[in-house]
Amino acid sequence: MRSKTVFRNAATWWLFCATLLSITSFSVPASSGADDLVARKIYTGWIPYYAMKTALPAAVANGDLIKEVMPFWYTLKSESVITDLYTPANPSVPMANPLASMRDSGFAIIPTITDGTSKLALAKIIANSKTRTTLVATITKLVVTNNFHGIDLDFEGFAFVDGNATWPSTQPNWVAFVKELSDSLHQQEKLLSVTTPVLFDPLSGKKGYYLYDWATIAPMIDRLRIMTYDYSTASPGPIGPLSWAEKSVQYAVSVVPASKIYVGVAGYGRDWVTRVTGICPSAVAKTVSPTAKAATFVMRDASTLSTTYGAVPLYNESYAEVTFSYQKVYNGLSASGLATTCTASRTAWYMDARGYAARAQLVGKYHLGGITAWTLGMEDPGALDAVRQVAQSIAPDQVIGALTTQANELSYGTPIDVKAVFSLADKQPIAGLQVRVEGLNAGETIWRTLADAITSEDGSIATSVLVGKSISLRVSSDGTWDRNSSQSPPQAIAITRRISIVSPASSPLGVPIRISGVVQPHAAGVQISLQEFILGKWQSSPQGAMTDSSGKFEILITKGSRGFAQYRLSTSADAQLKGVTSSIFNVVIY
């Protein structure tokens, strides 16, 4: 089972707030930029509600490695209730603050929901079509309301609480639930991530937690995060042996697209008591015992722990983990109040920088999406430097798209001529690249595809798009293992209304002049203003009009003297369309 030991810090909240306020000042460690190499963004992980002071700054400081994060903030209580764990734990820091820091760092935000129900409760919810549909709606609403990029499901109760006798009946219901949630989220252009324990090739004779059925849900999900840790819990041993993790990865890539797969790394270690001599003080007797649960520690504290007790850490190449053993003396009082002492022999295991690097190398070997850490902020700086070196060695080529258009302002109905050139960082053109022209209107948050194209031998495209309102344009390409995704800087194109006018060339004195016309695009409520050229300058007339639903309007104006009158009309503007002023037209009054 995933280690969810709460590593709480007693620091006061003002320190927490100060930490969050200073997040924007974090930068990539100097050692990472020594050779100015761009790193593939292969690192991601969880940001727990109880460890915001360390987890969020660690993510922001290593943004060159991270493209997405999973706030560990929610737990499911029923098909219609998802409990917010963040707010009670962080009463002085509104959730909007860390979310803003994540968005400012360019992270995709994919919060995790855990199973907070009782034994078999969630299995019953997804077994019933009505409650399953309600659950799908509840999760989708959480994602859409908060504008998250998606959701991560960490439903471990099936595996570790319900019992494996329930797996055959739970498995098809789990698949049905994932399918329905996937459809719902994808309709909203949101991502579905699932976090599960390990599975193995059934032909190997060791299936793992097969109820999660990776092969069937593979087309439905966007991320598969494998908990390749907690291999040893009851007795001393590695947290997640490299060969064991790789076997699970090998099965995963055989049934799930490799780019969706993230292999787990543990930022924690375990410290077991293996032997006790003497009688331990009553205050520690239950925990200082070979039968007690192992203590946990975070990676960044491992060196201090070994040094304190004079232990010599040994790196196990096969497991890609570190272990050390030591003895600790406990002094105190027995249950009867007498002085007593005991000596515990202890053994610790954890992943260090070499272990993180070994697992990061699986990303390059199998072309995985990345590694995922339980949790961000537990690692020591050396581990992130080691990951960064691997990430730089497998970095994709940088693709640069440059967009040009014929003008920044066009009249409604005029096609926008789009030209773009795609090249590598060394200016080498990229031929045969599938690219998109994308648009974003005012008030929208999702870029829409307006046209598809393939670059020519010189890396260029030329196409045209027709839009109905002001828009920002960019050209984009999807990433592959060898090349990164790209988006050109957006270019704003203002679309002006188009106005057509019908006016008499002449009119008798005292007879109302009828000026009519149509505004495009057709819309009701567009204000039409009339101006007349008098004494060398344009002056606004009190006469005006509003368009009807067909975009039509009519203005009546009566002149009190004979002569030559010059007029022009202008339309109002809004967030979507720029106003336009018509050509000058003349009326002879006789």
Image: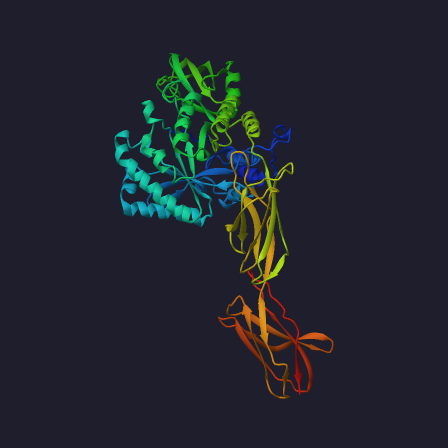
On the question of residue 577 being in view, the answer is yes
The quarter of the picture where the C terminus appears is bottom right
Q: Is residue 486 left or right of residue 227?
A: right
Q: Position of residue 4 (x, y in %)?
A: 41, 31
Quadrant location, the N terminus: top left
Q: Residue at x 60, y 65 (%)?
A: 579
Say if 27 sits above or below 383 in the image: below
**Left or right of 509 in this view: 445:** left
State the image coordinates of residue 107 (x, y, percent, origin top left): 52, 40
Q: Position of residue 160 (x, y in %)?
A: 32, 30
Give me the residue at 34% from left, 34% from top: 212
The residue sitting at 45% across, 17% down in the picture is 318
Q: Nearer the viewer, residue 349 or 496?
A: 496
Pinpoint residue 304: horizontal percent, then vertical percent: 53, 20
Given residues 425 and 511, the one toward you in this image is 425
- Which quadrant would residue 576 be assigned to in this image? bottom right
Q: Nearer the viewer, residue 109 or 359?
A: 359
Can residue 270 be seen in the rendering of this structure?
A: no
